[in-house]
Every structure is written in C-alpha cells, then in structure tokens.
Image: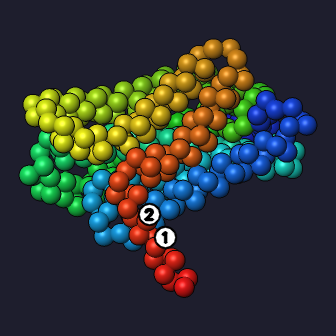
C-alpha cells in the first residue's frame, strides 16, 4: 500500500471497559483508588529503600527499579482509561496510540527484572560468602542497563513495524492501544509483525522464566542439603515475597495470553485489567507484608514522622 494511505487515520476510538453506563461512576472511583494506591505504594517502597541504609543492597536496588517500573507501567494505560470514563471522549490520536503501545511493551519487558532478582537470591543463598564479591555494584548496574536496553530494542522493533502499517478501521475494542488489537485493524500484510510479536513475546517470557526456575532449583537443592528449620525459614523469608510476585506476574501474563487466543473480547479486557492494574497494585503489599526488612523500615519511618510531628 502506498505511503500516503498510511496516515489516512488520524485517531483511534477506544471502546474501553465492558461496563454499563449506569455503573461508569462506580468503576471510575474504584479504578482511581486502585491507581492512586499503586502509585503511592510503589513510591513508598522507593522512599523506604532510599532512606534506610539497611536496604542499600542489590536485592532492594532491583526492587526499587521494579517499583518504579510498576508505577510507570500502570501510568501508561490507567490515566487515559480514567479520562475516557469521565469525559466519554474515547478518541486517542494516532501518534499517541503508537506512543502508548511503545511504552506499554517497553515497561512490560522491563518487568522481567524478576529474573535478575531471582539470580540475586540464588547468589545470596547458594554462595553467601561470595555474595558481596559477585553482586558488586558494577554487575548490578550492568544487569539493569542490559534489561533496559533489551526492552527498549524489543519495544522499538514492534513500534517501527507498527508505524509502517495501514489501517482500514479506527475502533479498538480495548481500553488501551493493544498491539494485537491494532494488528487486526490493519489493511497491510501483518505477517512480519505477527512473527516478531510471537518470537519476541516467547523470548521475553521463556528465557526469564527459565532463569527464575533454574535459580530456584539451585536454591531448593541448597536448602535440601542442609535441612535445618532455621535455614528453611530464612530462605522462605528471603524468597517468599519474590516468589509471590513471580507467580502473580506470570499467572496474569498467561491469563492474558490464553484469553487473547480465544474469541471473547470481554475476557481479554478483564485479563488485561488484571495484568495492568491489579498486579502493580498488589506488588507493594506483597513486599511490605511478607518482607521483614521492609516492615521494619516502614515502622522506623512512621516513628520518625511521629517524632517530627510532635
């Protein structure tokens, strides 16, 4: 298709959530509360890690970036969804839609910092005497930069391929500019984009998940070699929060994948809400309630606030 036809659509219409008009107000305040809790909860984690010297370790260094990613990831889609629910203006400019798709893919890939955190837990439990040497600051920064660069490359590849497509429809049956939904609206040949989506998506899921499974496999073997109650409790307290977040992240991701393979748009949207809204919301609570160091740091912060206020 000729290049001049590719820009014939200047904006898209987001159909939003499958909610009855009389329930829009209730769901608006529900999602607004969830979004604000997500932002405040994750920012609180970042603040605690920055203020408490005891949390200046590789594990919490990665956790602070995961919290920042969760805030950004939720902010890519939820504010626009809330604005559409409040104003009933469901349009989004073409450039804004492409930009939203880029940042959604970019931040979704960055969430695979969970694999880096699993490696950190593996070194801490299986090689505790060499932990400070292995997980030095240079390696932590390198792992973080590699994660960001790979995510940027994947998102940029998808976005560039998407920008080359022509669109013969402008109604997106979703609450954000989902890549799969956009490909279905295209008049162009999307085989290359679909191949890249499948390949990159599989790589983003399979390789980090394999890394997590291998890391925790070694951790399990290490625990079984010294089957003491104290050692098991220490390992669970160290890894419990991370395992909970990993289960939540990959569970909702699989739900999105399975729903996308079906015919129900409503199930696809509900799974996407779990992935984009609920998961970033629960992460701060999981790390705060199941992590002793975070709980202590939170108590110290509140005590300092009370002393300062008096």
The residue sitting at 36% across, 27% down in the picture is 206
Using residue 107 as the reference point, say whether residue 179 is left or right of it. Answer: right
| Percent of width and height locating residue 62 | 35, 53
The residue sitting at 13% across, 32% down in the picture is 227
> How was the colour assigned to the protein in this rendering?
rainbow
Using residue 306 as the reference point, say whether residue 32 is left or right of it. Answer: right
Say which residue label 1 marks: 302
Are the residues at dot 1 and dot 2 in contact (C-beta closer than 8 Å)?
yes
The residue sitting at 57% across, 36% down in the picture is 275
Q: Is residue 230 visible?
A: yes
Question: Which structural element holds mark 2?
Answer: helix
* 35 or 289, nearer to the observer: 289
Whether 310 is drawn above or below 99: the answer is below
Residue 98 marker: none
Question: Which structural element holds mark 1?
Answer: helix
Choose top left, top right, bottom left or bottom right for residue 262. top right
Whether 231 is drawn above or below 139: the answer is above
Using residue 63 as the reference point, say whether residue 163 is left or right of it. Answer: right
- Distance, label 1 to label 2, CA atoms, is 6 Å
* 77 or 162, nearer to the observer: 77
Whether 199 is drawn above or below 162: the answer is above
* 76 or 12, nearer to the observer: 76
Residue 298 marker: 2
The residue sitting at 65% across, 55% down in the picture is 36
Mark 1: give few (<14), some (14-19) or many (20+) Cα within 10 Å.
Answer: few
| Percent of width and height locating residue 42 | 51, 56
| Percent of width and height locating residue 44 | 50, 62
Residue found at the far right of this picture:
22
Q: Quadrant of the N terminus?
A: top right
Q: Quadrant of the C terminus?
A: bottom right
């Amino acid at each position: 298709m000729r290049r001049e036809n590719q820009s014939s659509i200047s904006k898209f219409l987001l159909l939003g959530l499958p909610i009855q008009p009389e329930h829009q107000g209730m769901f608006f305040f529900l999602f607004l509360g969830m979004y604000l809790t997500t932002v405040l909860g994750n920012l609180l984690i970042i603040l605690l890690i920055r203020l408490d010297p005891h949390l200046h370790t590789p594990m919490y260094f990665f956790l602070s970036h995961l919290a920042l990613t969760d805030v950004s990831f939720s902010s890519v889609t939820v504010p626009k969804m809330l604005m559409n629910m409040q104003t009933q203006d469901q349009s989004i400019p073409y450039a804004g839609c492409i930009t939203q798709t880029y940042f959604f893919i970019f931040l979704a890939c960055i969430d695979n910092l969970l694999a880096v955190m699993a490696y950190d837990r593996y070194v801490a439990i299986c090689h505790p005497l060499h932990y400070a040497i292995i997980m030095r600051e240079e390696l932590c920064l390198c792992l973080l930069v590699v994660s960001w660069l790979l995510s940027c490359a994947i998102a940029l590849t998808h976005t560039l391929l998407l920008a080359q497509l022509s669109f013969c429809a402008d109604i997106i049956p979703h609450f954000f500019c989902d890549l799969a939904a956009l490909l279905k609206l295209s008049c162009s040949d999307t085989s290359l984009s679909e191949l890249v989506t499948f390949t990159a998506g599989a790589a983003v899921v399979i390789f980090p998940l394999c890394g997590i499974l291998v890391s925790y496999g070694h951790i399990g073997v290490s625990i079984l070699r010294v089957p003491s109650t104290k050692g098991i409790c220490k390992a669970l307290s160290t890894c419990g929060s991370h395992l909970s977040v990993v289960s939540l992240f990959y569970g909702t991701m699989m739900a999105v994948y399975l729903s996308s393979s079906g015919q129900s748009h409503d199930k696809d949207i509900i799974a996407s809400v779990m992935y984009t809204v609920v998961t970033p919301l629960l992460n701060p609570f999981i790390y705060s309630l199941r992590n002793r160091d975070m709980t202590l740091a939170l108590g110290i912060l509140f005590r300092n606030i009370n002393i300062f206020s008096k």
